[in-house]
Every structure is written in C-alpha cells, then in structure tokens.
Amino acid sequence: MNRLTIVKVGGKVIENPDLLKNFLFEFTKISGNKILVHGGGTSATELANKLGIPTKMVQGRRITDEASLNVIVMVYAGLINKRIVSFLHSFGSNAAGFTGADFDLIRSRIRKHPEIDFGYVGDIENVNTDELRLLLEEGVVPVIAPVTHDGKGQLLNTNADTIASEMAKELSNHFTVYLLYCFEKKGVLADPEDNESALSHLSFNQFQSMVNDGIISSGMIPKLENGFNAKKNGIAEVIITNTGNISTGKGTRLTFEDIQ
Amino acid sequence: MNRLTIVKVGGKVIENPDLLKNFLFEFTKISGNKILVHGGGTSATELANKLGIPTKMVQGRRITDEASLNVIVMVYAGLINKRIVSFLHSFGSNAAGFTGADFDLIRSRIRKHPEIDFGYVGDIENVNTDELRLLLEEGVVPVIAPVTHDGKGQLLNTNADTIASEMAKELSNHFTVYLLYCFEKKGVLADPEDNESALSHLSFNQFQSMVNDGIISSGMIPKLENGFNAKKNGIAEVIITNTGNISTGKGTRLTFEDIQ
C-alpha cells in the first residue's frame, strides 16, 4: 500500500503567520501523500471576546452556542484554512481546504450528554474516504478544518485531534498511514521541565503510569488517548513530534509493547 | 458539448438562512452540471462594524486593508460558503466549497491604480479549469466564494460577478455555458417601479440608452457590463433573473442583436 502521512497541527504555530509559514515549508518536505488537519489555537476565542460572545468551557470542551459556532466556522474554515492553503501553494503544493461538509467528507451527530448541553458540538459518525482518495491520487494536499456537519444542513464544531485519528483509521484500509501530532515540544517529555527529555517511544503502560504520576498533564491526556486509539486501529505509526521535525520522523512513537 | 449552468447569487438572499434555503432548493432543481458563485451581501460590513473596522468604499469598491481582508475571508470563505455547502447536502447535492486559492483555481493580481490604493483587491489573471472539470464529471457542485490568491501566499478580495463571468468564459471552451445573475427583481425592469415590467431580452444598444435615460441604476451597470462581456466571449446565454426563477429559464436575456 502507498504511504500517507496525516499531520495534525494546532496551538501557537497556527496563530502566528511567520511560524505557520515555517511549519508549512517543513510540511511540504514530507514525501508522498499527505493530509493536514488543523485546529484553531486561541484565534476563535479572541474573535469571540472582541464580539462580546462569552466562551464557556466544560471538561476542556467549548460549549458551542450558535454565535460561537459562527465564530468557529469563520475562523477555522475561513481565515486559518484559506491562509494555510494559500501559503502551501506558494511552496508549490497543490493544496485545497475542506470542512467535513464539503463532499460530505465527515458526517457527525450533535453530542448528547446526560447532564451537559454542549451545543453545536459534533461526534463523528462517518468518514467518507472516496473523494479524499481521488484527490490524493491527483496529488492534491487536503487541508481539513475542524468543522463537520450532520447531513441535514447543520454545521458542527468537532475536535481536530479526533478528526485526524478517525481519518487515519478509515484511510488505513487504503494506505500505510503515519499519523503525526505536532506540538511546540519535541515529543512526550520524561521530565516536563526539560525539552531535551523527549521519549523515543511511549508504551500504553508507561502512558498510564505517567498520568498517575502527574508527569503527563491534563491537556495531553485526551490527545494521547486519541493517538493510542488510532494506533490500536491499524495505523502504522502514531508519532508525537514538534513542528520543526515533521519531515524527519523524529519524535515519540506510541506503542502497545513495552520497550526497555 | 454538455450543458453547464453557472449561477451568481448575492444580496439579501445570502444573509437570511430561510431565504437562502429556499433559493438553494430551487438551485438543486437545475439539471446537469452546475456551479454556484456567491457574494456576501452586507454580512462582511456588519461584522467589520462590530469589530470597529471602518468600511471604506471608493467607486463602489471596498478598500480592503488587512483587517477588512480577514473579515471578508472569514465571512465569505468561512460562514457563508460552508453554510451553503451544508444546506446543499441536505437537499442531496454533492456540494464542495472553494476559494480561488483551493487547487489554485483562480489566480489574481493585486489591483494597481494610478490614484487609489484598493488594498488587497485582486483582478483575475487566470482561471484554472482542470480541477473544476474533474469535479463536475464526478457530479460535484462547486460553490465558489469571492476570494482569490496571488500564488505567493496572499489572499485577495475579488468581485463575485467577475469571478462568475471569467469562469463562464474559460469553461465555455468545454461546456455550453448558461450564466445566470440572480437578484430580488424578476429581471431588468423597463420601469424600475414595476417588478412585473421585466424585459425578456436586453440588447446592448437598449442597455446603453437605458443607462443614458437613468432607468438602469448605478449598481446594476457594472453587473450588466460583466454580463455583456461574458456574452461576447462565447457564453450561450447570459440571463438576469430572480432567485425563485433560476430553474425555469425565465428572466432577461442579454443579446447583441436588437430584438423588436
């Protein structure tokens, strides 16, 4: 099977056009088929603040009322997605930006929770890979914004980490998939204070004990759970790396074996 | 050659979700290949106002500084484009939304003017129809937002009427193209006060004399000039119609012959 690299990027690199350009230049060096999935960093919150729309977070998730959804669609699917696409073309990459609504790529269902109304948050039901595969065959580089839809005309806010892992799972039926989660740090750190302490591998047992010991912080836990979930479902490699290393293969590889 | 209908829509219908849904349902009734090009109505100006970004218009064109460009990309390429795409899927249309940056569909050049600095306004240099034709063959309905790029990483604000006519010209080498400009009125009115006075045809001579007599108002003049320019360049039919009539073929047909 052909190789496909799916890169998830978020955080500060998204918000700063110069950092973003450097990252995208590294991204274009990845050989073979590739897909970029991006988050939005704090830009959506900043726009919401300017517009006087309060940001409500519960359990690390944004409560998405209609006004917040509009902000998310504007910032993620509009400004950030099209800026990335335009920069990628300047580096000779035939990029095209999509949400889950375009070509019905990702259909999701509004989140039902017994106690919390998350609003317009979508949990993924189906990833349609037909159009993605046609585009990848043509050499197109899809750039995916974290917005999906329910198929009935409602756009939904969907977590970018989950989009990356669900796409990776579906596409691993057709490609040897490498899934890269990109951060400012060089990988999962054995010592959170030392950026040079990135582990070459992280086993699932090790992950659980590092969570118990408080070494892996709360924000990273769902991301790594997503990563292990993807790894369990036939993805060749799941790598936690930093934005400067995406074309080198360096970083922390997730594994279910205990490597000494 | 196969038939292709390109519909340009803007104005109030874009801003009101219920009007937009009705219009899109009519749009899906058009048989054969179709492309929708949309403007943004007053939504971009409203968001700019809320953000305290002044809107400067010169000769009917928006002066687009960086803050205004970001607003345009957010509203046109984000909110409006994705809302349309999601609504079209709810009617069974396999829609996908693009700007000129996606697939390098429309490359433009920043406008140079001897006296006025229009800012990030792009004049179209090239329409790349390769990807559009592949998508149309697959039955995809492209939805185009009025944002283009310069190929060097700069997004640009580009007039939606011009995008529709330039796309129509390029695609008329491969399709029999019908270009429909949609408004609230039933066509070009012989009497601006009477919505039932829509002309079945408007010749170029008639257009010029109606402009001289002040019957055709300033806002319509560049739109009709765009339409006549398209008609001159091999488009089968250019029709000015209203949003309820797009699937019926009713409206005012532009012509270079004087029809009595």
Image: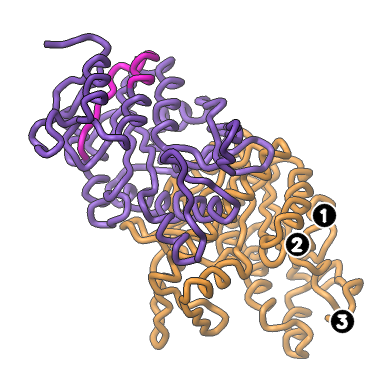
Chain colours: A purple, B orange
In the rendering, at what x and y percent does residue B249 appear? 82, 54
Q: Secondary structure at mark 1?
A: loop
Residue identifier under label 3: B193
Q: Nearer the viewer, mark 1 or mark 3?
A: 3
Label 2 marks a residue whose chain is B
Q: Secondary structure at mark 3?
A: loop
Q: Around disc 2, counting alpha carbons within 10 Å, would you say few (fewer than 14), some (14 to 19), or many (20 or more)?
A: many
Q: Amino acid at mark 1?
A: Gly
Residue identifier under label 1: B249
The numbered mark at residue B226 is none
Q: Earlier in the sequence, mark 1 or mark 3?
A: 3
Q: Nearer the viewer, residue B16 or A255?
A: A255
Badge 1 and badge 3 both on one subunit: yes
Residue identifier under label 2: B239
Dividing the picture into quadrants, the one containing residue B149 is: bottom left
Dividing the picture into quadrants, the one containing residue A36 is: top left
Residue at image point 39% right, 86% down: B114
Residue at image point 77% right, 47% down: B25
Q: Secondary structure at mark 2?
A: strand
Q: CA distance from mark 1 to mark 2?
A: 8 Å
Q: Amino acid at mark 2?
A: Ile
